[in-house]
Amino acid sequence: MGRYFGTDGIRGKAGVTLTDETVYKVGKFVGNYYKDAKIVIGMDTRLSSKDFEQDLCRGMKESGAEVYLLGYCSTPCLAYITMADKFSCGVMISASHNPYTDNGIKIFANDGFKIKDDIESLIEDYIDDPTGIEEKEGGKIIDYKEAIREYQNWLLQRYPLDMKGMKVCVDLCNGSNCYTAKDVLNKINGKFEYINDAPDGTNINNNCGSTHLGMLQEKVKNGDYSTGFAFDGDADRVLFVDEDGEVVDGDKIMYMLSKYLKEKGLLNKDTLVTTVMSNIGLYKALEKEGIASDITPVGDKNVCDSIVKNGFVIGGEQSGHIIYANDCFFGDGLKTALLVMEALSHYNISLKESVKDIKIYPQLLVNETVKDKNIVLNDETIMKKIEEVAERLGNNGRILVRPSGTEPLIRVMVEAENDELCHDCVYEVIDLIKERGYAA
């Protein structure tokens, strides 16, 4: 991670750690970096997004760039338009699953990938020392909202589904997919009903969406739905609930899709790419299906790097951020949902039935806000405690302690044979962090 860029772009509290001036500098550098720059911008629904859009435009226009505005749209929509319409790059204003008080900047190259680390470093250098870029004439701002239809049509052509007889509840998270998903799903033969579809700038991710599934679970369980799914704020992730309201997380989704793709002869090298956060139960279930796994550090960029480097076709995260390379190299919650529904239609079974053979081990993840992540992870006493816990868990569990890539948090995760053991192991580490004075 860099000085400003984390595992998923630049992110911080809007107006505090991520300021208008910083966003303006990003715009000015990006507008100058690409020759004859033609840049497209999208944004999610949080209150600060419009101001940050104006900051980016100001910087890019001063650098002589042509700037095309998609307005409110999902991150995958922005990534697709960047690639399909051959823009120099695309910039998404979003803090994903974070609260509305945060915001962020994600930048995509014109091949649909996130920009390379060396470009991120150059942007960080300019933020710290904004010199060497002269203003240019010719910059202009162009409304480009109609291009969202290109993305929607691409999905409909790629997934011509018939979900007749299915009743699906969709949680739009008061976020980006309020503007991009409905026009796709409403054209599919099936019944789709929506919740959390009235964004007001402050309610994105507010007790809704893929990080807060309670409302969707109750709705599906009590409403005679076949299934339900929920996006995060910028809609690059999706999680499901089955007909009983039970959560089907990213691990279970990847298990089901890997089996489906293998059966169709599309699972190249019979391998699924996961991150270190995936559950032990996923790997045990994959082994029974003859599917290997390639494990990467946390972050969709790492998953994508493995897919590209090794020629794999699918990978993702427990959070529901899944990349299917036969379509594109960016995560897309709506596309993942369509692929899942395609698989269910192919098998003619329920979501619950499709994942019945994977047993998820109890898991507990606790986030502790700290003053300095690096000091915690270099403390010998804490490292020794982690080793002791790992040895105690043996082959029937594991502990993972890592820094958040976007927030001042240490994440402590334990998987074990029962909930009590998970709790005891996690809090041995959390309590030690507090005892040593590192908690913020």
Image: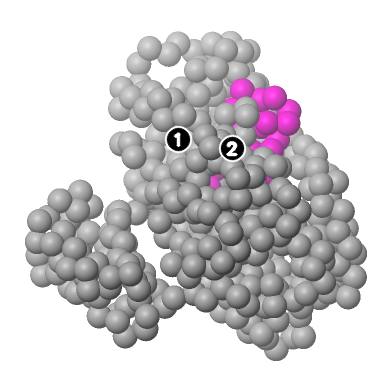
Q: Secondary structure at mark 2?
A: loop
Placement of 405 over or under 289, stated as above or below: above
Q: Residue furthest bottom?
A: 222
Q: Which residues are magenta?
A: 76-94
314 or 45: nearer the viewer: 314
Placement of 130 over or under 152, stated as above or below: above
Residue found 81% across the figure and 47% down from its top: 158
Can residue 303 be seen by looking at this rendering? yes
**Which residue is denoted by mark 2 in the rendering?**
311
Is 231 inside the magenta-drawn segment?
no
Can residue 96 be seen by looking at this rendering? no
Residue 421, percent from left and from top:
29, 81
Give me the C-alpha separation between circle 2 and circle 1.
36 Å
CA neighbours of label 1 inside 10 A, class few (<14), some (14 to 19), many (20+) = many
**Which residue is denoted by mark 1 in the rendering?**
23
Camera-nearest label, 2 or 1: 2
* Quarter of the figure with the N terminus: top left
Residue 204, percent from left and from top:
56, 62
Is 79 inside the magenta-drawn segment?
yes
Residue found 70% across the figure and 81% down from its top: 243
